[in-house]
Image (spheres, rainbow, N blue to C red):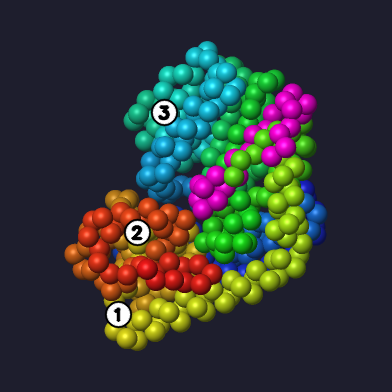
Amino acid sequence: MNCQICSSRKLVHVVSLGHHALPDVFVTPAEATEPFTVYPLDLYVCGQCWLAQIGYQVDPDLLFRDFVYTTESNPASKPHFGRLTTSLVERFQLGNEDLAVDLASNDGTLLEQYDGRVRILGVDPSSATAGAMAKGVPTIVDFFTEATAKHILATWQPARVITTMNAFAHIKELDAFMGGVVTLLAEDGVFVSESHHLQNVITGMQYDLIHHEHLRFYSLRPLTVLFDRYGLEIFDVEETTTQGGSLLVYAGRTGVRPVSPNVGRLLAQETAAGLYSIDTYVAWAARLAQSKRRLLSLLYDLKSQGATIAGVGASAKGNTILNYCGIRPDLLDYITDGSELKQGRLAPGSLIPVTGDEELLDRQPDYALVLTANLKDIIIGKLRGKGYRGRFIVAGEVPSTE
Ligand SMILES: [Zn+2]
């Protein structure tokens, strides 16, 4: 096996999280009585460029065919993309003749925020694009490659801005994708990507980010290696709160823009956090196993005392927690979620039934396990506001109740 960015064979196995069903394919009750396929979920780190990555890569057609996540289902998306698009228009002086392309554009939520200030185009292979079409956001339903970029150039124009938000780590054919980016990008164009920052997986024990859609866990250093191969240079970087801590990375053609001191500062921060040292990952794997034992102890104790426990937030991340820890319907009665696409189905692997949020309010279980830890403040606030009176359990390094 070779590193997904630098092709080095110096991959170090960090931890196995077991075999998992596809994390976003919620199954029907009929399907739940049939056999299903599980895939190994192992974390590796490259000793050459320090990219953290999973070992087994599932065929993207299988992974995204029944993709049920929509951007607008995340309440934090719209305000975040609103601020970002305004900042891009102002900082890079975009006008209404300029083209902004969003890759993995999903339901078009980001592109809508440009609000007529630029020409917009989305590219995304998933069924979530139906939402974009319904809103009139121009969208090409396909994977993005060099061929797609050439197709766009034939009918549109080079892109002043290309964005990809929380999807850059999901792309299996990374070289085809980057070839497309450099083909489509204008000479002074900017490629903006937002990806979860590996540092938070390590320091914040955000292991739920590890699932089969998330092939890579970026820190800045491996991204500089990747971009350099395509004649691109990172000229600025910001830390954001998205997904529990992300990097917003600005890249352009090498030498076109001055490089902000933020870049060197972040590389130094990553070095200080131990991201470029194997010892960090060995220690992390031990802490991960301990966090699992703590969560299971808590759940078993509560269940033995006769408590009722429901999960809240049926997400790909939550499914990592459930399947890594081996939590099944005998520990968690049901999971509530606002998405009608998931209600009436069962969570992949654990086969815990998914119901609507109102079930939590009707049944008032003693405890609610928050399965979307990165959105915990929003979820807890929302459910308290609606009248849930029980206590919340938040998974993490030391599971807590509040
Ligand atoms: Zn590497």
Marked residue nearer the N-terminal end (2 or 1): 1
251 in the magenta segment:
yes
State which quadrant residue 232 falls in.
top right
Note whether 25 is above or below 247 in the view shown.
below
> Within 8 Å of ligand 1, the CB of disc 3?
no
User: Which residue corresponds to mark 3?
Assistant: 112
Q: From mark 3 to mark 1, how far is it between C-alphas?
A: 45 Å
Q: Residue at x 34, y 82 (%)?
A: 303
**In x, y percent, where is residue 207?**
56, 63
User: Which residue corresponds to mark 1?
Assistant: 307
Identified by mark 1, the residue type is Ala
Which numbered marker is on residue 136?
none
**In x, y percent, where is residue 114?**
45, 25
For the record, the magenta segment spans: 240-262
Note whether 89 is above or below 285 in the view shown.
above
Q: Secondary structure at mark 3?
A: helix
Q: Secondary structure at mark 2?
A: helix
Which numbered marker is on residue 380?
2
Q: Looking at this view, is 250 or 273 the one in front?
A: 273
Marked residue nearer the N-terminal end (3 or 1): 3
Identified by mark 2, the residue type is Ile
